Amino acid sequence: MIYFDNSSTTSVRPEVCSVYSQLLQTTYGNPDSLHALGKKAGNLMEKSRAQIASLMHVEPKEIIFTGCASESNTLAICGYALANENRGHHILVSNVEHASIDHSMGWLKRFGFEIEYLPINEEGIVTPEIVKEKMRKDTILVSVMHVNNEMGAINPIREIEKVVHANPTCAFHVDCVQSFTKISIPFEILDMATISAHKIHGLKGSALLMKKKNIRVVPMLQGGQQEQGLRGGTQNAPVNIVLAKTIRLAMEEMESSYKKVKEINDYLRKELALIPGTSINSPDNALPYILNISFDRITSEVLLNALNQRDVYVSAKSTCSSHSTNASATLMAMNKSEKIATHMIRLSFSKDNTIEEAKEFIQIVKEIIKEYGLSL
Ligand code: PLP
């Protein structure tokens, strides 16, 4: 098997699995219970929160545990907008965000918010200039993803932040799902940031929202006092406890993983360029963990199925929009042709991939194009 779909989800680290299964048996108390078993779970969860905060250079009360990045994004966007509508109703968002951001914006429109979309350029990024052009006095929130999940394009969030915070009443949210533990993130200058564990060899059902203490949001999940009253429901203590270890291990391997993945990406770019009719859609300076390509003789669907039959797993478009058959919105927004946008696949790598897999992938793709490729 070749698994090149790590932007969809990753394998769970064995160390994370073993701590998690121990916790399930020993630390099942409700962290809000006043007895010893509950207190044990609560104390370990707060210790994990403090460790995560220290790794991200923020304060423990600025970490809110959630169940997935989609939930974190919803809390950041809808929770912030509804808590701050006295300041204004104008929100800026890039036009290629994850569905959880996009749909949250759609929902806010019903409450009278004015959503304006920031176009990406041909390199797949939002420029600080375009943000400056669209900013208004009544803009209360700007949301831009750090790394694009289809292309790997890296947005210049440091420069965008300067433009956003030139308006002191505007907050900046960044979806860091595809960049976290892969490149450094300046959490100190962000108001809110979204992170998911299952993209970094952690557990599904585990994520967080980093929210600075001066930023007000209203809860999206109603309930009790959990997570400062911002997320009702019994906290998933074992999952939240093991998240600190997941993040620490991924951060410790950040440099070595990057180097390994970059070698694989460089090799594939070089070899793919030799196959006639291939387009490399990811920009040259994209994050090497993601490589978006198109072959002009074979559609995404046919290639995906043929690879699948050979136990090679990749994505066409991002996984959350994989059930719609139209062209990739990101590629269309980058001004690529419809053909490129309907013939693309996304390869995404992890520390567990090898150059040998990349070599085998090239061989298999050549065979598939020979067998199924349309003559032009
Ligand atoms: N944001 C981005 C950029 C993503 O790529 C994804 C998942 O693919 C998400 C958010 C949603 O993550 P989750 O599956 O944890 O809800």
Image (tube, grey):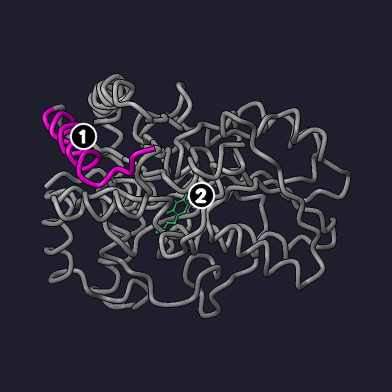
Magenta stretch: residue 369 in it?
yes
Q: Residue furthest right?
A: 137
Q: Is residue 17 visible?
A: yes
Q: Position of residue 204 (x, y in %)?
A: 30, 61
- Seen at 86% across and 43% down, the residue is 136
Quadrant, the C terminus: top left
The image's mark for residue 366 is: 1
**Amino acid at pointer 1:** Lys
Instruction: Compute the Cα span from label 1 to label 2.
Output: 23 Å
Residue placed under numbered mark 2 in the picture: 328
Residue beneath the point at 51% across and 52% down:
327
- The residue closer to the viewer here, 253 or 98, is 98
The correct choice, above or below, for 100 with respect to 33 in the image is above
Q: Amino acid at mark 2?
A: Ser
- The span shown in magenta is 356-376
Residue at the (27%, 26%) spot, across then down: 268
The disc label shown at residue 350, or none = none
Between residue 52 and residue 14, name the one nearer to us.
14
